[in-house]
Image (tube, rainbow, N blue to C red):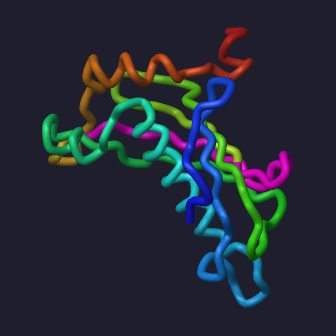
């Protein structure tokens, strides 16, 4: 699914994604649920570039991130063989939550936008505070939206 390595650019994580046949429906258009997969992969790679391995977080701290809420707006379809970019940034960081804003685009034009609220949870499924070392890593990549900056 990945076309090339991910990178940080202008404070955003960028993950190139090529659309393969398996991602599409009979008309050659990306099946709507696959955008969620692209976004999940991008958030995982963003954490990896921050130095956070999700398997180590679970193993060493008994913690994981779970999607608490996701708002998604489908604006235009992607098609077979398109090269997409998933741009991700954190817009808010709470005691046990983080908000990621993601845009999936083709040639600079937004196709799908997502706002994903993530909850840090313990192995028992209950909310858990984000540990200090992880908070420090995430804070460096948190860019509030312009509306949040003005309040």
Looking at the image, which residue sits at the far bottom? 26
Quarter-of-image position of residue 32:
bottom right
Residue sitting at 44 percent across and 40 percent down?
118
Q: Against 137, is 110 above or below?
A: below
Residue that lies at the very extreme toward the front in this rendered image: 4
Residue drawn at point x = 28 percent, y = 43 percent: 64
Q: Quadrant of the C terminus?
A: top right
Would residue 141 be found to the left or right of residue 50 on screen? right
36 vs 61: above or below: below
Would you place residue 2 above or below residue 20 in this image?
Answer: above
Question: Which of 138/92 is in front?
Answer: 138
Secondary structure that dominates the magenta span: strand
Q: Is residue 101 magenta?
A: no
**Left or right, 26 with reference to 127:** right
Q: Quadrant of the N terminus?
A: bottom right
In the figure, is residue 65 to the left or right of 142?
left
| Residue 39: percent from left, percent from top | 56, 52
- Residue 19, percent from left and from top: 68, 69
How many badges with numbers are in the image? 0
Instruction: Give the magenta part as a residue range.
Output: 104-121
Residue 45 percent across, percent down from the top left: 47, 45
What residue do we see at 58% from left, 26% from top?
Answer: 91
Q: Residue at x 65, y 75 (%)?
A: 20
Counting from the top left corner in percent of width and height, residue 14 is at 63, 41
Q: In which quarter of the image is residue 119?
A: top left
């Amino acid at each position: 699914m990945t076309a090339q390595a991910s990178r940080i650019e202008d404070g955003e994580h960028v993950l190139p994604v090529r659309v393969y046949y398996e991602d599409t429906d009979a008309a050659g258009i990306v099946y709507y649920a696959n955008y969620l997969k692209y976004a999940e992969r991008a958030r995982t790679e963003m954490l990896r570039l921050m130095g956070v391995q999700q398997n180590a977080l679970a193993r060493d701290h008994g913690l994981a991130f779970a999607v608490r809420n996701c708002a998604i707006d489908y604006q235009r379809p992607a098609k077979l063989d398109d090269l997409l970019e998933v741009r991700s940034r954190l817009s808010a960081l709470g005691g046990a939550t983080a908000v990621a804003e993601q845009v999936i685009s083709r040639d600079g034009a937004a196709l799908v936008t997502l706002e994903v609220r993530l909850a840090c949870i313990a192995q028992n499924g209950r909310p858990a505070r984000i540990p200090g070392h992880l908070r420090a890593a995430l804070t460096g990549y948190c860019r509030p939206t312009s509306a949040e900056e003005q309040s």
